[in-house]
Amino acid sequence: MTPSSPDAYNCIDIDECLNEMQCGPNATCTNTPGLWSCACDTGFRVTDDTQEPSPSNPCVDIDECVNETLCVPNAVCINSPGLWSCVCDTGFRTEDAAQEPSPTNLCVDINECTETPDVCGPLSICFNKFGTYNCACSDGHFSSTGIIWTEDSVCKNVTVVLDELSVSEGQTKEMAFFAFIDEQVKESKGDFLTEAMLVNIFAASMEIAGVGPFVSPPRVNSTGDGVTGSIILDITERLMSSLLQHVGEKLTLRLNTSTFDLNLVKFGPGVNKSKRFPLTANGNIMEINMESLAENNNGWAAAVFLSLSGMDSLLSHLYFQSENQATSEFASDVFTAFLPTMNNTNLTEPVNFTIQHNRMTPDSGSVTCVYWKVDIEPIMKTLRGEEEKKEEPATLGWSEEGCWVSYTDPKSTVCSCSHLSTFALILQIGEPPPPNDFLVLLNRICVAIGLFFFVLAILTFLLCSWNPKINNSARLHLCLNLGLSHLLLLLSDLFVNTPAGCKAVAIILHFLVVSSFVWMQLEAIQLFLLVRGLNKVRVIQRDGLPKPALFAIGYGVPTVIVGISAAVYHPGYGLTEAEVCWLSTTRNFNWALTGPVIAILAMNCALFFATLWSLRTILANMKSGASESKDAKLVLFKILAQFVILGCTWILGLYQTDLILQILFIVFNSQQGTFLYIVHCLLNREIREECLKYLTCSHNKSKNEKDALSVSEDLDK
């Protein structure tokens, strides 16, 4: 090409981007004809956003993870130069392991306890928690590292742990264990304390004290071990303070195991709007004004309500010194209440405890609200070896100071206390009143007379053959069941010292009494059916229910009631608080009898009025004939007599407040057999005539004469 040709002087574009450092690091150079430009790579930004990227104004990484909502819950954002990614937190994983966390692929909890059964090691229990897991030793074992679980923790039998502890001179292995726990609580300040470890500490402590739920029989005698109990309570209070830090933002905590029942609640600004909190432990209730406590503690307060199984054996009721000579025993569980990290000796408002009785309060007994009063500092100093061991402190026992009974009934008591501590109910039982020899003798004589007439009535129904058209099965079995129940009640004192025999007597009595009421109901039905047919003009035939139906109902219904009752709660049968073999009032078990009796009495009332309604025609025409009037009056009398005899006499048993009512109940209830014999035998013309025939040996009269004499039996019934 010559210089004079047109193409000799054409200009071509210079590609400035060939210089890799033209734009500086983390930037991309873009060439255009005659121009070039720089832009930061994705994930980077220019240092000075008013200038383009250049070696002197380089592109720097953008930290996208500053945006906390960039990743889904339970995931963490990881930033890298120019990039970012989301990964699940420790203890979580994505639903689809092949994909990163996203709104459609959330991070879910990993249950380490099921996926790796031996994650905690042998003789241990794994407790899965959201995002993590806790380990603790199983019952009867304790961690080699104490209250702090580490990777080196090994679960050992409690006895092995005791043997491995170093014991000071004059110190027992048990006290060495509690000193070891006390030192760890003091040093750790709650670090790494978990709910699972708390469960294990309580279980091991109560077992070593010899009173745990798995220690049978307890290794503590009736005098108790107040020092050990006080040590456990002191360690417990400091453990609760540590646990309060561990639970974090939780407002309440409830732990219920075979060893203890714990309820913890926190109160603070903007949470738990209720001012009075009902905390429960083993059926007992504590009501405390948390707002007033928080006002004196920077707006925050916490309360713990705890019941430890076996603590009643350590803090024996014998530590209670009564001013009178009455015997004492626990009437409730032993429970403790305190305010973690707070001075809880004085309260601006009393705390109310609703305490369930562990037994019915007898008439000769009274309950007292008491708390465990102990000078704990000397005991703990001795435990830590800070001073020489002394005899049991003088201040150690149950006290009534600052506690009083606000309300009580046979099943529960409300105690009000001006301070928090460990509480219980002490039942003081005075000497029972001496038995009334007159009532005992009267009862035996009256029951013997009643049994005689029961036997006489039964023999009369069996031996006398009167109108075969009349069904007397209900009367016969009514007398049989009532007579047997009266006889068994008279002999039940022979079985009070034999648990199995007493339980059997109670079950049989339950069956006989229910059966008596059922047969009473059947007799009322028979009476109603017979009265209903008095005005009907028809051939005389057998009235009432057939015998198979009577037996099926009369003994089938009691069998079902007693069978269901025994299956649902068989401990309800046996020796009661009144020292008789009968049905217990625990869990309202006595309604297994009261319910059927009330139902039958209600039906009897209905049948009574229905029977009167059926007699209205005869009653309205009493003057139409002397014989009809006399028979109708007799029917009316028998209806009223049987209703009063078999129904109303039981009502007297509910009102035994004075001697007169006791005598009336003994007389009327024991003479049911006498009244039944008078009404259904002596006032029955057919029976009188049949008995006369047997006595005079003239029972071979013709059938026609017998039929003629028996026509009036329908009216007598």
Image: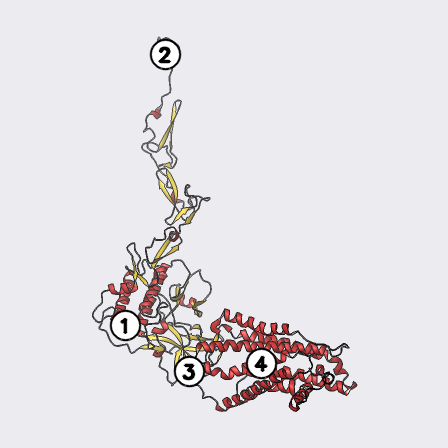
Indicate the position of residue 716 as horizontal and vertical percent values.
Answer: 70, 83
Residue beneath the point at 52% across and 77% down: 508
Mark 3: amino acid: Ile
Mark 4: amino acid: Leu
Disc 1 versus disc 2: nearer the observer: 1
Q: CA distance from mark 4 to mark 3?
A: 40 Å
Towards the viewer: 99 or 295: 99
Work out whether mark 3 precedes mark 1 in sequence or the reverse, and give the earlier one.
1
**Pointer 3 local density, CA inside 10 Å: few below 14, some 14–19, many at least 20:** some
Mark 1: amino acid: Ile
Q: In the visual, does 263 lie left or right of 640?
A: left
Work out whether mark 4 precedes mark 3 in sequence or the reverse, and give the earlier one.
3
User: SS at mark 1?
Assistant: helix
Q: Which residue is mark 1?
A: 379
Q: CA distance from mark 1 to mark 2?
A: 111 Å
Q: In the visual, does 247 lie left or right of 687?
A: left
Q: How many marks?
A: 4
Towards the viewer: 145 or 57: 145
Q: CA distance from mark 2 to mark 3?
A: 130 Å
User: Could you say which disc has been placed on residue 429 in the image?
Assistant: 3
Work out whether mark 4 precedes mark 2 in sequence or the reverse, and give the earlier one.
2
Mark 2: amino acid: Ala
Q: Which residue is mark 4?
A: 480
User: Could you say which disc has been placed on residue 8 in the image?
Assistant: 2
Q: Quadrant of residue 482?
A: bottom right
